[in-house]
Image (cartoon, rainbow, N blue to C red):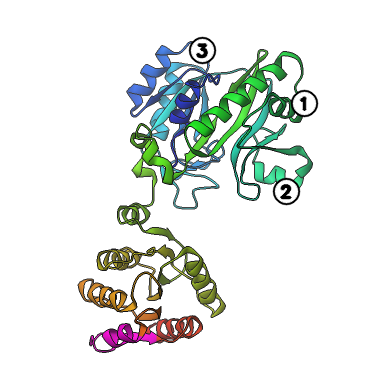
Amino acid sequence: MNIHEYQAKELLAKFGVPIPQGIAALTVDEAVAAAGKLPGPLYVVKSQIHAGGRGKGKFKELAPEAKGGVRLAKSVDEVRAHATDMLGNTLVTIQTGDAGKQVNRLYVTDGVDIGKEYYLSMLVDRATGRIAIVASTEGGMDIEAVAHDTPEKIFTITVDPVAGFQPHHGRAVAKALALSGDLAKQCQTLTGQIYAAFVALDCEQIEINPLAESGGKLMVLDTKMSFDGNAMFRHPELVPLRDETEEDAMELEASKYDLAYIKLDGDIGCMVNGAGLAMATMDIIKLNGAFPANFLDVGGGASKEKVTAAFKIILADPAVKGILVNIFGGIMRCDIIAEGVVAAAREVKLAVPLVVRLEGTNVAEGKKIMAESGLPIVSADNLGDAAQKIVAEVKKAA
């Protein structure tokens, strides 16, 4: 689960992390009122969307030369002008794709005189099974570009989960950022506070870019925070922070049925049980010259209701020209899966080619159910056969 910048900063502030004063706003008048409560005379008006690159982004509705989604304002009147430009308009950044995202919230913060910018993040390193701290002196820049062009400027430090964060970790981060004296001490404290927040909130990532030095003080100017969705049962206080308007409508609908769905750019819809099998299915579709329209994992307990919901979600994508169902019936019997597929195909009045590959428990019974259904379901013997058949069926229907 992702949250907005202002929400992440409010959470970090509870752990003692220094952040500039700021107030969220949903309307132009609220943005102006927020500026009136801040010290000024310099303000920053920031679009709140779940995507990076806001500062360099462009609004679809504004002239190409218009400023991006993060703007400085030297007066309350400028705050009003910027808020009017941003709210309700679509911001396109390097991370949103061409569709962009509509700006429905703003964050008005106090301006900061920046001396130097740094990059600091924490994430789960799957290779080591530890929390990794990533630090760089190249703050305020695209960290992917830094990693590609000057990888020697990125430092990674891992933390043993048993011992936890120790003073030497903080010193290592300060050294990586070339900080000394009081700034180094501040860095050690701040890094420990962020680590504490990461562990306590079951985060997947906390990214601070930039971490800025201003007047001899370190301060978090921008941050992204995401959480492990599997840990949300431990954090009911975080659930209200979810902004469903920032999520893909089909992915949101899939989550209601405990389906793992991600929209892709192809035209062959996929419904598979198991993430690994789903990846293999997408690969073999591409190997046969076509492209998958989605990743969809129905999980191990694919009930009739789940299968029906999956079909509806796949078909909600107008790009889908055919569907490939690839199920390995282990815990779930193939005959039960077949009944669900037949029922779902009838309910949604399926009008695109459907190829089904079943394997596992009661596979013969499952294939018989589909064959006797009277529906134009094409049965496949193996994954390679299934991919070839769905690609051929889609080309035939085109």
- Numbered tag placed on residue 258 in the rendering: none
Residue in the picture at 53% in, 18% down: 16
Q: Nearer the viewer, mark 1 or mark 3?
A: 1
- Numbered tag placed on residue 148 in the rendering: 2
The picture places residue 81, in percent across and down from the top left corner, at 42, 26
Magenta extent? 364-379
Residue in the picture at 50% in, 25% down: 12
Is residue 22 covered in magenta? Answer: no
Amino acid type at image mark 2: His
- Horizontally, residue 324 falls left or right of residue 304, namely right
The first of marks 3 and 2 along the sequence is 3
Amino acid type at image mark 1: Ala
Q: Secondary structure at mark 2?
A: helix
The first of marks 2 and 1 along the sequence is 2
Amino acid type at image mark 3: Pro
Residue holding disc 3: 41
- Horizontally, residue 356 falls left or right of residue 341, namely right
Q: Nearer the viewer, mark 3 or mark 2?
A: 2
The picture places residue 117, in percent across and down from the top left corner, at 67, 27
Query: Where is 256 relative to 88, above or below?
Result: below
Disc 3 crowd rating (10 Å Cα; few below 14, some 14-19, many 20+) is few
Which quarter of the figure is the N terminus placed in? top left
Residue in the picture at 53% in, 16% down: 42
Q: CA distance from mark 1 to mark 3?
A: 31 Å
Callouts 3 and 2 close, C-beta under 8 Å: no
